[in-house]
Image (cartoon, rainbow, N blue to C red):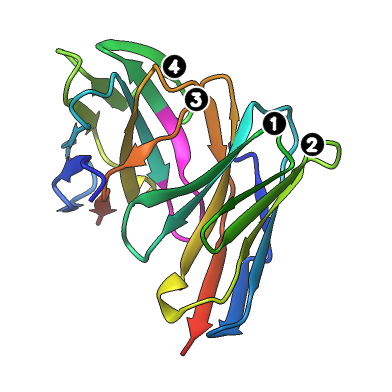
């Protein structure tokens, strides 16, 4: 069964704009991770935020975590056409990793 | 290139046939995971190994599914008597037990189509 729920399911923006994706989950976690998947390919790890962290940055990515609301957000700044992909959050509790259904991001050139 | 390889990349089979997929993890990774992903959904956990030991199996893994990792290196996932509902992408991932936060490295997947 899946744990996280991403919102929105699909997002379409122009190149240069920022993209924000949200993830809500139900149970306690050790950490939350975001992955990216290009069409028909495997997943690529983007960023990990621990349960005791509130915000993390990596290049053009910014992730926030609010454990009281059981939610996380992924912000991609200055988007590029190459950012077009599906983005999944994954919650980790001990060795148990559960993925959401993903947000499909389309960045138009 | 994450270093995890899967073969074959695509498999088309008729209902009722058996299929076997192979996953070669990153060489020093002692944990190996199998997931199933259907269109428009995130990966669903099937099972995972630490070295050669299968430590957890999802209830999604019916008795038609079996996974092995005999020498703690590559793994195989076999589906017997395939059904159309088995059509999906089967993803393999590996990680290092020493990494406490379980970052996983995924292979490209095997896409199964059951006719």
In the displayed structure image, the side of residue A103 where residue B54 appears, left or right: left
The residue lying furthest to the bottom in this view is A109
Determine which residue is flagged by label 4. B56
Residue A77 in magenta?
no
Q: Is residue A69 left or right of residue B52?
A: right
Residue plotted at (31% across, 27% down):
B64
Q: Secondary structure at mark 4?
A: strand
| Distance CA(mark 4)–CA(mark 2) | 27 Å
Specify whether disc 3 shares its chain with disc 4: yes
Task: Residue A105: give x, y in percent of width and height.
Answer: 54, 71
- Which residue does the numbered mark 1 point to in the structure image? A51
- Residue at horizontal 27%, vertical 44%? B107
Q: Decide which of B75, A49 is in the foreground and name it.
A: A49
Which numbered mark, 1 or 3, is in the foreground of this view?
A: 1
Q: Position of residue A6 (x, y in %)?
A: 66, 55
Alpha carbon distance from label 3 to label 4: 10 Å
Which image quadrant for residue A26? top right
Query: Which of marks 1 and 2 precedes in the sequence?
Result: 1
Q: Which residue is mark 3?
A: B59
| One can see residue A8 in this view | yes
Q: Are marks 4 and 2 on the same chain?
A: no
Name the subunit of mark 3.
B
Provide residue B61's location: percent of width, then percent of height: 41, 27
Distance in Å between CA atoms under marks 3 and 2: 28 Å
Front-most of residues A13 and B66: A13
């Amino acid at each position: 069964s899946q744990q996280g729920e991403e919102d929105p399911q699909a997002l379409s923006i122009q190149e240069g704009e920022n993209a924000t994706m949200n993830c809500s989950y139900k149970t306690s976690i050790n950490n939350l991770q975001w992955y990216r998947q290009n069409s028909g390919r495997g997943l690529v790890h983007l960023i990990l935020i621990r349960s005791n962290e509130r915000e993390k940055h990596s290049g053009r990515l910014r992730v926030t975590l609010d454990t009281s609301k059981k939610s996380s957000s992924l912000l991609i700044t200055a988007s590029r056409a190459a950012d077009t992909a599906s983005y999944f959050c994954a919650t980790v509790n001990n060795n148990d990793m559960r993925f959401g259904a993903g947000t499909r991001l389309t960045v138009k050139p | 290139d994450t270093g995890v390889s899967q073969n074959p990349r695509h498999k088309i089979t008729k209902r009722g046939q058996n299929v076997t997929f192979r996953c070669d993890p990153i060489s020093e990774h002692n944990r190996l995971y199998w997931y199933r992903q259907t269109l428009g959904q995130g990966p669903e956990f099937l099972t995972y190994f630490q070295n050669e030991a299968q430590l957890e199996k999802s209830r999604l893994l019916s008795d038609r599914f079996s996974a092995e990792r005999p020498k703690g290196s590559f793994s195989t996932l076999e589906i017997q008597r395939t059904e159309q509902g088995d059509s999906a992408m089967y993803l393999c991932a590996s990680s290092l037990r020493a990494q406490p936060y379980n970052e996983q490295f995924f292979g490209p997947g095997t896409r199964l189509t059951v006719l």
